[in-house]
Image (cartoon, rainbow, N blue to C red):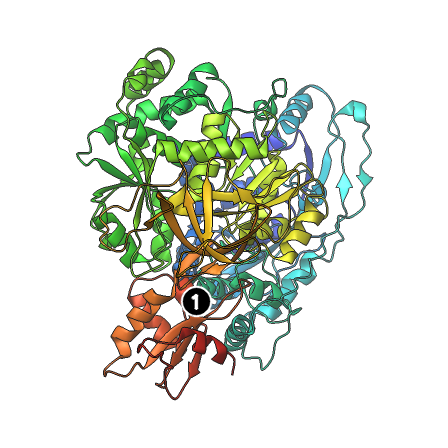
Amino acid sequence: MKSLIKNLIYWLFLFILRTRYKIQVKGLDKVRERGGDSILFLPNHPALIDPVIVSTVLAHGFMPRPLADEQQVDRIFVRPFVKLVRAVVIPDIKNRGSDGQKSVLAGLSGIVEGLRQGDNILLYPAGRIYRSRREDLQANSSVKLVLDQVPEARPVLVRTVGLWGSSFSRASGRPSLLYHWKRNLLAVLSGFIFFTPKRDVTIEFYEADDFPHGEDKLAINRYLETYYNKVEQYNTYVPYFWWQGREPKKVVEPEHGSRFHDAGRVPAAIRKQVEAKLKELTGLSSVSDNDLLAKDLALDSLVLVELAAWIESEFGVSLGNTDDIQTVGATILAAAGEISGSGEIELAPMEEHWFAVEPAAELELPQGETIAELFLYQALNHPGRLIVSDQNSGSKSYGNLLTGIFALRPTITRIQSERVGIMLPASTASAVTYLSVLFSGKTPVMLNWTVGIANMRYCLENVDVDHVITAKALVEKIKGQGIDVDQLSCRFLYLEEMAAGLTLPQKLIALFKSRFVTKELTSQSISPTAAILFTSGSEAKPKAVPLSHANLLANCRDLVEVFSMTSSDRLLGMLPPFHSLGLTGTLVLPLVVSMPTVYSPNPTEGNLLAKITQQSGVTILIGTPTFLGGIVGSAEGEFLPRVRLAVTGAEKCQDYVYEAIRQSCPKAVISEGYGITECAPVVSVNDPADPVPGTIGRLMKSMECRIVHPESYEPLDDGIAGMLLLRGPNVFNGYLNYHGKSPFIEYDKKKWYVSGDLVKSENGLLTFCGRLKRFIKLGGEMISLPAIEEILLGCYQSGDEPVLAVESTPGDDHPQVVLFSTLDLKREEVNQKIRESGLSPLHNIRQIQRVAEIPLLGTGKTDYRGLQSLIGQ
């Protein structure tokens, strides 16, 4: 019965395919004459559609088991087909971190086992579709690995010609099985009625007697490429409907030149480490920035996974995968956090209604005391307006969010604790979860998973959180990065399981309530604390920062006034909600002013974010300079012409980011600002009407500030750098469960927050001048030098005389953590101690300088200024 169902499905596919394609098959009879067991079919890959065509052609008599990407097939409508054809599922390496290589090898073992059992397997040697009209296998080793283990398998080469130029190929500019679905559906329907034009597709099978068994991967790949590229492929357009004509037309080949990556600005320490790793992996004595990882260094995809895992472990930079990291220079930039690869990208189409704009109007913040109240105002007045979107969930309206809230509330309400943890990236799910926690009368606690397991555990215990809402995919990714979240003393509530556990009656009730019983939400008592965030540990441990609704909404009102947002604006949300600017600027603000926001979970995936920005009509970007640089650095030419505003902060925006934004976003204004978690977070920002590069703009309208001498607290004149004191409705009231020195002082008969930062003012325009506390910022994250020093002293200090001290290289451009020591310490050993303590790789030591003694002040404390002068000597 199952075999009959399979055949019917394949015949249906073949029937549909023939409405668009004229398929000619060559050489398959000769393969069939030799028998049909343990065949390893090795096709080229000109387009996304050729696996469907080849599988359909081979179904009769061979029934090959296709390979399937775990991420692509783990969908409710796809799983039955995957099971039916017994696909070999290859694990998704993107979320496996350091286990990525093992995961891929485990997947390949499924191919090996299938061949040994007599199954036929469909394996694509390239692992990706054509980048140009010729197949390029680079240094991939999958064929070599499989045939070494199953030498008796019969390799059969498959050459597909005719698909280069189709809408499913990169020659069309946007290869997608979804993006062109309307046109393709109309073409198929037309094919049932009219004699529509068809694309000629030839599939040729060749079982070679001279296949290079036993040779190295490069020899095998050259043999395959010679066969695949023997027949020229041309960028050919074939009309879809009879009235467009019938003759195919050759089209100019698309340009696919790789961009030059200038890694000259990267610190020598990072360059040295990356080059040393590449030499170790390749056995070469030297590498240069323009060397291609695959062609020149012969690194295959599995070794590139190992390289990506090493960069993540060593530098704390998440690469996703390395498909767009093609050169040594790009790899060095990736280690510095300036570039990332997103691999083969197929975006889900946006709903047309996403772009619907009512008569252009200024966005305003409604009156109200809580975020919940303002959200309900917008949701009840505009239930059908699409407000959030992401690649996993699609576009959701205010009404959809209300349904989600009613669906999640019962589970969250049953939690006994007053506070509920949220550990989610920027996404539609994070918005729904945050609102659901608020409307359950609980306090959301935003958990930062990048600070290391020790700090995560401390944060949860400090604020008494025993339940954390998260996603399985995120937890798997965190585990893949070597962080054992099972050590946390909390229970994870997985959104996937919560959604799957909803019965049909529960879903219908949630839908009904969202339409007719919203009073249940208006009557809910809301926690006075809108969120609890955590500092990044500028001293020994992170501090819990409770922010009230008044804090966040005051900041939102100021931002609305400065940026003059309209109903035609669209926002990109990439900062995680544990980031104060991510919470206020890309989650709360758009929900309460009704600005549609498209989310993407990984701010380091510049290529993906650039494509989402273009597809979704994004007009406003908010992010750190590093993240914005990754986006515009992935764009080509005027790739993002709709972007009008780029808001950035957390670190100095370097000149190269300014230049990259000018090139890719010609209409964009760059507005640098300055913020502090305790201030919810924006303190100052440049007016887009008159931005001044190199400054942090003017103080928020609702705030006051004083610039004073850091020791005497005497007021300072314009142009003189001093410590910044702040007060205003966005400033928090104090840390939770904290017994250290108060962050406030009494000054001029008022209570002021002590920022710990040095700024100067010239006619109201502020310039950041440095930090009083000993911490640096890497990728927008605060890295505590005292925290690193404390750990290492605990490992190596044995007597009264200090044996080590930690400082950083001067300047804000790629600061590096430097260890001064009187001991002969190895960097790898020291960084292992840091990782074992639970700190993230961002805390890793970059340089070690051996000194005769640690310089001391007259008080007996370490002379850090003296150490600064020794850096590089």
Residue reaching furthest left?
Answer: 416
Q: Nearer the viewer, residue 419 or 676?
A: 676
Residue 338, x across and y down, in percent: 56, 58
Q: Nearer the viewer, residue 349 or 243?
A: 349
Quadrant of the image for the N terminus? top left
Left or right of residue 818, residue 272 in this image: right
* Image quarter of residue 425: top left
Q: Is residue 848 above or below residue 745?
A: below
The mark total stands at: 1
Res. 77 visible in picture: no
Q: Residue at x 49, y 26 (%)?
A: 593
Left or right of residue 357, residue 302 in this image: left
Q: Nearer the viewer, residue 835 or 360?
A: 360
Q: Residues within 10 Å of mark 1 (few under 14, many from 20)?
A: many
Q: Is residue 357 above or below residue 249?
A: above
Residue reaching furthest top?
Answer: 516
Q: Residue at x 65, y 32 (%)?
A: 18
Residue 179, x across and y down, in percent: 61, 33
Q: Nearer the viewer, residue 150 or 207?
A: 150
Residue 109, x across and y down, in percent: 40, 59
Residue that badge 1 annotates: 314
Identify residue type, mark 1. Answer: Glu
Res. 539 visible in picture: yes
Q: Residue at x 61, y 29 (%)?
A: 181
Residue 170, x across and y down, in percent: 67, 45
Secondary structure at badge 1 equals: helix
Left or right of residue 502, residue 711 in this image: right
Residue reaching furthest bottom?
Answer: 852
Q: Is residue 619 above or below residue 539?
A: above
